[in-house]
């Protein structure tokens, strides 16, 4: 399932996938795969993404 | 800035050195595999009244480079001949190697040859005196018991005399291994210096999963290929390739599966590796391998007498690196398109 909340949070911060990838020390392809729902990140990477986007885990990764 | 410039020059120097070494290494490998010559004489040997009156059987040959050479000789008449054949290798009048026997399939111990002209001569020895005279030519003062010709007879015997002189295999192997070691070390240094900037490659968590899967598929491929070759070998159908060449080819195919899988799933380049530079290195490597493949194809070292030869490894490596390069370029081209899917 696509993670549209992550994509919009990133867009709201005016960050490209490359920028977010650098901030989290991962490849751009990994961020792309998370947004497309092709890869489920570990809790450590989720936290790194949340810190980079100033969001909470619930806001980005909790499915209602 | 100045320091960075110096670093670039060191890298260029290493690259030039590596390229030169590779060219010399390929040329040396091709050169060392060359035989000095092969000689075959096929004809009836007639012994009448205990004497051989036919033409002299022999060949002159030249050694151009000093080194250790192996002389292999074979004569194997279908029936017990009425004589003994002696083989002498002469440098001028000096006999430097010899052997005798009515049937022979043997190699001399590798012997040091100086550059110069030599003669290999097959001598038909029909009685004990001729035999004693023949071995007396040799410094060793060889003595016979005197009864070696007991029961020998006249007749016409069909014999093929074969002689081959080639550079010692141990010499070739040491050269090849030394070449591989130095090339491997240089390659390792180059990759370390160009890509990792003194730090270890860092893969993110998704890439580690991809790499794990890559190893798994590479191992399965290697296992399957070995199994297929074992079955072919068991049923006598493995003559198309020697086990050593097949092992090398199987390892290359296994590495190719790993590299292609990890490239397709973006796990090949570490987070801290500059993929552009790596593509540059692969391009240079591809061109060198392509040159080596062309040389091997032109020299006919790919396929001979129904068997693949060692040159096929260069062709295989060229194909694999070519596929990887194409994938690198396709990945770079499509990377921008994926950004905002």
Image (cartoon, coloured by chain):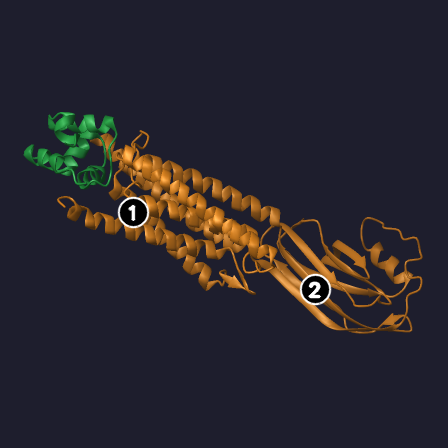
Question: Looking at the rendering, which quadrant does residue B165 occupy?
Answer: bottom right
How far apart, in angstroms, are the residues tagged by discs 1 and 2?
A: 55 Å
Residue B234 located left or right of residue B3: right
**Badges 1 and 2: C-beta atoms under 8 Å apart?**
no
Counting from the top left corner in percent of width and height, residue B81 is at 84, 67
Q: Residues within 10 Å of mark 2 (few under 14, many from 20)?
A: some
Q: Is residue B40 above or below residue B238?
A: below
Sequence-first tag of 1 and 2: 2
Q: Is residue B212 above or below residue B235?
A: above
Tell me if I can see residue B10 in this picture.
no
Quarter of the picture holding the N terminus of chain B: top left
Counting from the top left corner in percent of width and height, residue B254 is at 43, 47
Tell me if I can see residue B128 in this picture.
yes
User: Where does label 1 land, which residue?
Assistant: B264
* Chain name for mark 1: B
Counting from the top left corner in percent of width and height, residue B196 is at 30, 33
Residue B110 located left or right of residue B274: right
């Amino acid at each position: 399932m696509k993670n549209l909340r992550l994509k919009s949070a990133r867009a709201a911060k005016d960050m490209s996938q490359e920028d977010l990838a650098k901030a989290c020390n991962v490849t751009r392809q990994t961020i792309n795969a998370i947004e497309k729902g092709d890869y489920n990140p570990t809790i450590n990477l989720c936290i790194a993404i949340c810190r980079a986007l100033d969001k909470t885990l619930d806001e980005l990764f909790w499915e209602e | 800035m100045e320091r960075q410039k110096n670093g670039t020059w060191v890298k260029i120097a290493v690259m030039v050195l590596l390229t030169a070494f590779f060219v010399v290494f390929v040329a040396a490998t091709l050169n060392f595999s060359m035989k000095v010559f092969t000689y075959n004489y096929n004809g009836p040997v007639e012994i009448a009244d205990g004497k051989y009156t036919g033409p002299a059987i022999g060949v002159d040959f030249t050694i151009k480079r000093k080194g250790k050479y192996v002389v292999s000789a074979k004569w194997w008449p279908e029936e017990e001949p009425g004589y003994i054949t002696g083989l002498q290798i002469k440098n001028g009048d000096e006999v430097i190697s010899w052997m005798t026997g009515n049937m022979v399939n043997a190699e001399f111990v590798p012997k040091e040859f100086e550059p110069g002209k030599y003669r290999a001569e097959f001598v038909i020895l029909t009685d004990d005196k001729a035999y004693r005279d023949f071995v007396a030519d040799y410094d060793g003062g060889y003595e016979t018991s005197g009864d070696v010709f007991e029961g020998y007879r006249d007749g016409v015997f069909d014999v093929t005399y074969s002689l081959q002189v080639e550079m010692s295999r141990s010499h070739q192997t040491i050269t090849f291994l030394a070449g591989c070691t130095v090339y491997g070390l240089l390659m390792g240094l180059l990759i370390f210096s160009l890509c990792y900037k003194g730090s270890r490659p860092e893969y993110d968590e998704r890439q580690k999963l991809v790499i794990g899967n890559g190893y798994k598929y590479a191992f399965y491929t290697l296992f399957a290929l070995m199994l297929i070759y074992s079955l072919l070998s068991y049923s006598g159908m493995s003559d198309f390739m020697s086990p050593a060449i097949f092992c090398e080819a199987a390892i290359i195919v296994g590495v190719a599966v790993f590299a292609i899988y990890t490239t397709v799933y973006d796990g090949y380049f570490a987070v801290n590796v500059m993929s552009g530079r790596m593509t540059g290195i692969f391009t240079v490597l591809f061109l060198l391998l392509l040159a080596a493949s062309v040389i091997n194809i032109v020299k006919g070292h790919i396929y001979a007498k129904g068997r693949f030869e060692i040159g096929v490894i260069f062709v295989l490596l060229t194909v694999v690196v070519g596929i990887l390069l194409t994938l690198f370029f396709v990945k770079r081209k499509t990377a921008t398109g994926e950004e905002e899917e």
